[in-house]
Amino acid sequence: MGRVFDGIDSDVAAWIAEQHMFFVATAPLSADGMVNVSPRGQDSLSILDEHTVAWLDLTGSGAETIAHLAENGRICLMFSSFGPRPRIVRLHGRGRVVLPGEDTFERVQREHPGHVGARAVIVVDVSRVADACGWGVPVMEFVEDRDIMGPWAQKKGPEGLQAYRAEKNAVSLDGLPALADARHPPA
């Protein structure tokens, strides 16, 4: 059934590239803190090498992943096939936040053009790659990506996005600091 891989080999990378979405799980250190699981997609993930992945983190209603990574770095990505062949792949590792202007941000943004409102790139140094059967996952058909985030971010514009991040992305639900640029807007 399940296998553990030495890294993201070409077969696993090709399978990941076929998936339209993945899930990101993080948690604060506090036992009273909230575990967070977020869906990601929109063709935003890059496999940088066999032990590193990164994705464009688009502006959203919260910043839990960013806050948890800043506090402790723990992260797990889960990819699941919803097609006829069941499979789940999990990438465990340590994550970090890369902001606009840094080389990795620019690289990932170039690899996924057309996204408006990227607030960061999340980079994961992958320490464990494992798959599982996925037999409990239903078979579903991909129809299309939603075309909501891009127009929303475009309508807000750079200043509107900055104000939104300052209001919604400065701290996590647990009160952990999240986006530094949200708390300290550029002059």
Image (tube, grey):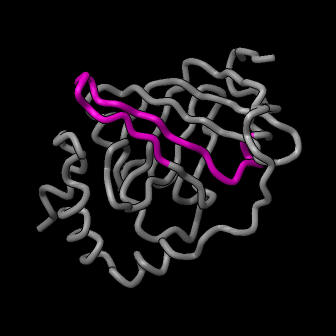
Camera-side residue: 111 or 29?
29
Q: Quadrant of residue 117?
A: bottom left
Q: Is residue 114 left or right of residue 37?
A: right
Q: Quadrant of residue 49?
A: top right
In the rendered view of the protein, which quadrant contains the C terminus? Answer: bottom left
Camera-side residue: 137 or 148?
137
Q: Is residue 15 above or below residue 157?
A: above
Q: Is residue 131 left or right of residue 85?
A: left
Q: Is residue 109 left or right of residue 5?
A: left
Q: Quadrant of residue 23?
A: top right
Instruction: Name the outermost residue toward the right.
Output: 84
Q: Position of residue 172 (x, y in %)?
A: 24, 45
Q: Is residue 58 above or below residue 3?
A: below
Q: Position of residue 71 (x, y in %)?
A: 25, 30
Camera-side residue: 179 or 173?
173
Q: Is residue 124 magenta?
A: no
Say which residue appears at 42% left-offset and 78% top-offset: 152
Instruction: Name the outermost residue toward the bottom.
Output: 155
Q: Position of residue 59 (x, y in %)?
A: 38, 62
Say which residue appears at 53% left-offset and 50% top-offset: 39
Say which residue appears at 88% left-offset and 45% top-offset: 84
Q: Is residue 18 magenta?
A: yes
The magenta segment: 16-38
Say which residue appears at 82% left-offset and 32% top-offset: 11
Q: Position of residue 159 (x, y in %)?
A: 24, 77
In the rendered view of the protein, which quadrant contains the N terminus? Answer: top right
